[in-house]
Amino acid sequence: MCYIPRRLSFPLFRSKILHIEHRLEVVSLSDIGRVRGVNEDAVAVDGDYGIAVVADGIGGHRAGEVASRMALDIIIERLRAKVQQYRAGTRQPTPLQFAEEIVSEANLAIHAAARRQPGCAGMGTTLALALFHNHSVALLHVGDSRIYRLRNGRLQVLTADDSLLHDQIELGLISAEDARGSHNRHLVTQALGIEASVPIHATEEDVVSGDVFLLCTDGLSDLVEESDLELIIDSLKTNLPLAANHLAQLANDNGGFDNISLALVRIHDQEPPAETKGWFSRLFGWLAS
């Protein structure tokens, strides 16, 4: 992946089920692909705090690997602290607001590190972040890593790429059909760490039981059609590790030209505690007698 300035402005799994307002089942996977010698992607999920994040590093001499790992380390650590405060009822900004502040901090830290270390000059990273809270999810992204949501069997992309190709499509300079074979598909126009500040796309979405969220780097989205993403996730949503494996395998089967990283999050209804269910069972049994 290359960065251009915007003129205008063996796979590893982690799987866990947690209990908050909804039950969230989370899985992450990162695969080096079939061509690259280094994996410059980074992916993390923290079920206890409702966090899923992927990053795709930019920069030679392994600097992209440094940037993506820095982004995740900073964001995960600081989000955990903020989420703890939020759950404790401490007066503070909303999850979307404090997540955006933390992403900005990560951007500045990467930028400063690149300026201090000549071997890391020009390094940066894309980012896709989901922070689940209450019955909502805060979504933040920079670059061309994407966030999708599967709901009622239909897959929808919830982010718009910061890329030259996306800008060309928006301006009518190239059709979506022609864009599939374009050489500009890897040219991102925004990334964390390139400048001291960066525009962050931030939005809030509701979550309902049955939703499945996919966060991924372009090593997946560039090589697997959305119809195939939809089919695999919908067919295998009851087995997220298997779904993740199939997605990465398909990207590799289609060339594996880039690193492949993804996180899957499935929303479940929260089950009432066992003692509550027992009380209701006794009550309904008494009423029926």
Image: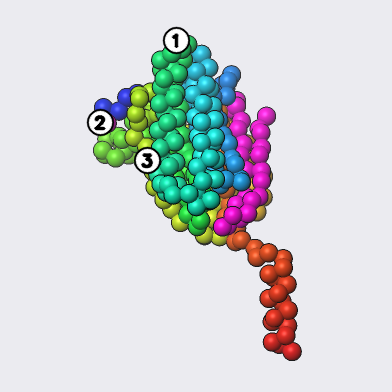
Disc 1 crowd rating (10 Å Cα; few below 14, some 14-19, many 20+) is: few
Instruction: Report how far apart the C-alphas of labels 3 and 1 lie in the structure.
Output: 29 Å
Taking depth in this image into account, of 283 and 64 the one nearest to the observer is: 283
Residue 23 appears left or right of 120: right
Mark 3 and mark 2 residues within 8 Å of each other at the beta carbon:
no
Q: Secondary structure at mark 2?
A: loop
Which residue: 59% across, 54% down?
20
Give the image location of residue 283, x and y in percent. Answer: 69, 81
Residue 44 can be seen, yes or no: yes
Which residue lies under the disc numbered 3? Answer: 201
Q: Is residue 207 above or below residue 37?
A: below
**Residue bearing the label numbered 1:** 118
- Which of the pair 42/280 is nearer the observer? 280
User: Looking at the picture, which amino acid does disc 3 mark?
Assistant: His
* In-image side of 137 versus 200 (left or right): right
Say whether residue 156 is left or right of residue 7. right
**Region in magenta:** 9-34
User: Element under label 1?
Assistant: helix
Q: Residue at x 46, y 56 (%)?
A: 206
Question: What residue did someone put label 2 on?
Answer: 8
Q: Examine the rendered structure and indicate whether residue 117 appears above or below residue 44.
A: above
Q: Splitting the image into 4 quarters, where does residue 289 fall?
A: bottom right
The chosen color scheme is rainbow
Q: Nearer the viewer, mark 3 or mark 2?
A: 3
Q: Secondary structure at mark 3?
A: strand
Specify the farthest residue to the top: 118
**Residue 245 percent coordinates (x, y):** 65, 40
Number of disc labels: 3
Q: Amino acid at mark 1?
A: Pro
